[in-house]
Image (cartoon, rainbow, N blue to C red):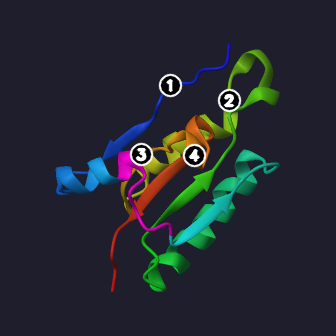
């Protein structure tokens, strides 16, 4: 069964207003990462490489497109679940939330990166 639940989380210290803006998609999308067609390992390597580069360029808000998992069969959306876990445990992620329908809905997620500059 494919789940369409909304994912979202924020780390301690992020302002409630900022998280609400993220949730509503009222952010400046400075980058877009599309993981369609990638395996979980490829996706992890890609995120490990690009997220620090984006932080260094001060591009701190964007969207990750992971798809809805329609091709995953009965096991559910593998890539979506991976992205959720990855974002939960990555210390450089301040907050994330499933995108609004206009930006891909539950097939994409908005993220806010920590400012390291």
Residues 47 and 32: in front is 32
Marks 3, 1: nearer the viewer: 1
In primary-sequence order, the first of circles 2 and 3 is 2
In primary-sequence order, the first of circles 2 and 1 is 1
User: From the viewer's perspective, is 6 left or right of 38?
Assistant: left
The residue where tag 4 is placed is 102
Q: Quadrant of residue 73?
A: top right
Mark 2: secondary structure: loop
The residue where tag 1 is placed is 5
Q: Quadrant of residue 63?
A: bottom right
Is the C-beta separation of discs 3 and 1 under 8 Å?
Answer: no
Q: Residue at x 77, y 27 (%)?
A: 70
For marks 3 and 1, give the CA distance: 16 Å
Mark 4: secondary structure: helix
The residue where tag 3 is placed is 88
The dot on residue 77 is 2
Q: Residue at x 71, y 46 (%)?
A: 40
- The magenta-colored residue range is 22-29
Residues 29 and 97: in front is 29
Residues 91 and 18: in front is 18
Secondary structure character of the magenta stretch overall: loop
Marks 2, 3: nearer the viewer: 2
């Amino acid at each position: 069964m494919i789940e369409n639940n909304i994912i979202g989380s924020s780390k301690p210290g992020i302002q409630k207003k900022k998280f609400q803006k993220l949730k509503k998609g009222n952010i400046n999308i400075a980058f877009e990462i599309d993981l369609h067609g990638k395996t979980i390992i490829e996706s992890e390597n890609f995120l490990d490489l690009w997220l620090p580069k984006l932080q260094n360029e001060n591009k701190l808000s964007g969207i990750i497109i992971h798809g809805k998992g329609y091709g995953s069969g009965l096991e559910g959306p593998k890539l979506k679940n991976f992205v959720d876990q990855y974002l939960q445990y990555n210390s450089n992620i301040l907050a994330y939330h499933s995108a609004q329908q206009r930006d891909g809905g539950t097939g994409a997620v908005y993220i806010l990166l920590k400012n390291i500059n």
